[in-house]
Amino acid sequence: MEATVAMTTHSTRCRLDQVTAGTCCTVESIESGEIAIQRLMAMGLCVGRQIEIIRHGNPLIVRLLGARIGVSARVAHHVIVDCAS
Amino acid sequence: MSSCCTADEPVRTRARRLALVGNPNSGKTTLFNALTGLRAQTANYPGTTVERRTGRLTLAGETIELIDLPGMYDLHALSEEERIAVDVLTGHSVKVPKPDAAIVLADAANLSRSLFLISQIIESNVPVIVALNMMDIAEDAGLEINTAQLARELGCPLVPIIARTGRGLDELRRAIQQIRSSSVPAVPVVTCTACNDCRFKTRYAWTDAMAGRVTQLTGQPRNLWTERIDHVLTHPVGGVFVFFAVMLGFFFLIFQIARIPMDMVDTLFTGLGGVIARHFPEGDLRDLLVQGVIGGMGGILVFLPQICILFFCLSLLEDVGYLARAAFVMDRLMRHVGLPGKAFVPLLSAHACAIPAIMASRVIEDKRDRLVTILVAPLMSCSARIPVYSMLAALLFARDPWRASLVFTGAYLLGVIAALAAALVFKRTILRGETRPLVLELPAYKWPSLRTAVLTVVDRALVFIKNAGTVILFISIVLWALATYPKGAPPPEAVAMQQQVASLTGPAAEELQTKIDRLVRHHALENSVAGRIGRFVEPVIRPLGFDWQIGIGIISSFAAREVIVSTLAVVYGVGEDVAKENPQSLYDSLRRAERSDGSKVFTTATCASLLIYYVLAAQCLSTQVVTRRETNSWKWPALQLGYMSVMAYVASLVVFHVLRALGVS
């Protein structure tokens, strides 16, 4: 349910597919609509996890638990992150 | 509590079974090969197309069976492969008995994630040995792991290893010897009661904490090499550029280097045929051996060098870590036709031969995506089509090499476009479903293992030879029989000429004898079952501009496409030997060939129609056999044959009539 995520101008929250390369962020919530996201979660993606975006685009590359993982933007779209840190 | 004691056979009377489990890219194949060597066997899990590799290792006189389970991240499986691994591990598989113990391969450089799987396996009541692999990479990354503490906390034997160099393997073998079915570790079970999401969260909280307790960061944590290389190789533009450069090199090897061993195979089989021809008395048995068995085997085994080189390169590229990058950069492009990035390499390999391409499509996780790839792969122009294209290009534009090369390019392009269009149609119709979105680990780059590459080649080559030696051999014998029987009396002209030979001497007699032989062979083929089928199907293929003689060529080339060239040589009375040594003379006589009404057979419209037909038709029964093997059903090869034939027929029909309407003849 995409509409439930309010994104104001002050917020540092955004969707993973919108984060620029080189940014470190924390996973805020995961919308578990996409089946493929389960694999990402099995690889260690969970709420509170620190991740880094290595390459922006579609697909994008994210560093997760020391591994580099190529992720389709469609999947990344369902991951809400906080880029404040 | 031991669960193995309930197995249907007592442990003592049979070899102990150990399963090898781990994340993808954890070095499972390397460890498996290091432990079992050449004694591995590959088969499918019963009723599936998932590959099952088993091997044996002997430790202090005891033989132990090792099963290599498909790589997985989680015991709650998503894909068919993972489901099978889970079923075997938990004893839910009907066909494969539960293993007595599991060796779980952990990645020292990514301990928390490895612990996620290890803890799940321990909870499923299997005795576990943890092999902590990639200790070198962890050390490079500045990680120091307290292995004694980790073993204590997990409550199971743990051996640090480097599978690639063999470090720690002796200790691992000792641990394998000592593990007993009663040694199920008493690990604190990670409980999770609520929803799906927190299943991951709870367990990862546990693994993160444990990994944190046993790991110390002592240096720079990053593998800068991988980072730097990836900056180029995963670039949306640069990455695609590098990818095509790599593929160009790959194809150079397949087409140029393979030529030498291919010639050797060809010479070997020709020589073998010659030896048999000399030592056997003239007759059906000799013909069967020379033309059916040796000719048929030679015609298909000539592709073995290409297949070996292809799998050797693929194995190296995968081992280095490049194939994951290739899938990554091609993902965006392939998505437009509804296929994942991983489908690209198999489809490209199909330009060498559809058989290894179909075998290589196993890397595609989603079953539907894989089926689509298998169905469309034979549309790519394989090397068996090259002799056919050469012949038709020469017939179309004899004096114009530029236009002839355009014919080649056009034929290749048509194959690619048809394959992508067919993929799109399949994904929208019978194999409807969203393409599995990419979630793919890009492993750290490393030196490839030659041993793994060689073992892969041996394995794939054996599968191919087994096919060639059974089903494909059978097909070529049947096709030989169709082209040979029933035998009739030689034509009256030949009998008359034979009488003349007696009165001649020297080169004149030889020349006449050759002419007689050709006449006899031409006559025999015309009266054979294949010839009759050719006449029988003529009404069907006539709208495409083909006559019954081309029909014979099409039927005979079901063994292998290039056979049409030698068949046409016989049908049009040139002689196979001449066609091989001097193709121009074949082309010339084909160009001169006339129908009974005096009109030319190989008009521009007929040649173009035949070219389109050979680009699109499923003119290779070996491919169907492999498709059957890889899809575990006759339904898919039947569909493949059906849709390709219909497409080829319609396209040729349109081309022939459009060209005729335009006055091109």
Image (spheres, rainbow, N blue to C red):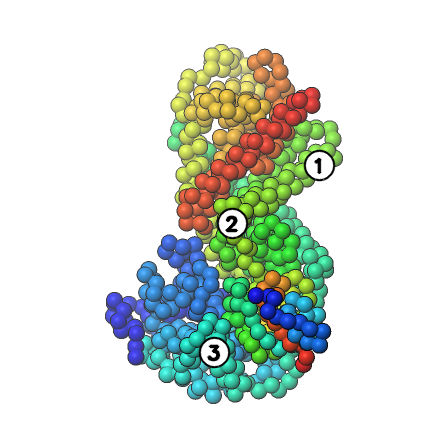
Disc 1 vs disc 3: Cβ atoms closer than 8 Å? Answer: no
Q: Nearest the camera: B73 or B377? A: B73
User: Could you say which is closer to the camera, residue B499 or residue B253?
Assistant: B253
Q: What element does badge 2 sit on?
A: loop
Q: Judge the density around disc 1: few (<14), some (14-19), many (≥20) Cα neighbours within 10 Å.
A: few
Q: Is residue B318 visible?
A: yes
**Residue under label 3:** B203
Lower position in the chain sequence, tag 2 or tag 1: 1
Amino acid found under the numbered disc labelled 1: Leu
- Could you say which disc has been placed on residue B585 in the image? none
Tell which of A13 and B188 is nearer to you.
Answer: A13
Q: Which residue is mark 1?
A: B406
Left or right of residue B246: residue B38: left
Q: Residue at x 41, y 65 (%)?
A: B85
Q: Which residue is mark 2?
A: B432
Picture coordinates of residue B220, whole percent (x, y) = 66, 82
Note whether residue B571 is visible. Answer: no
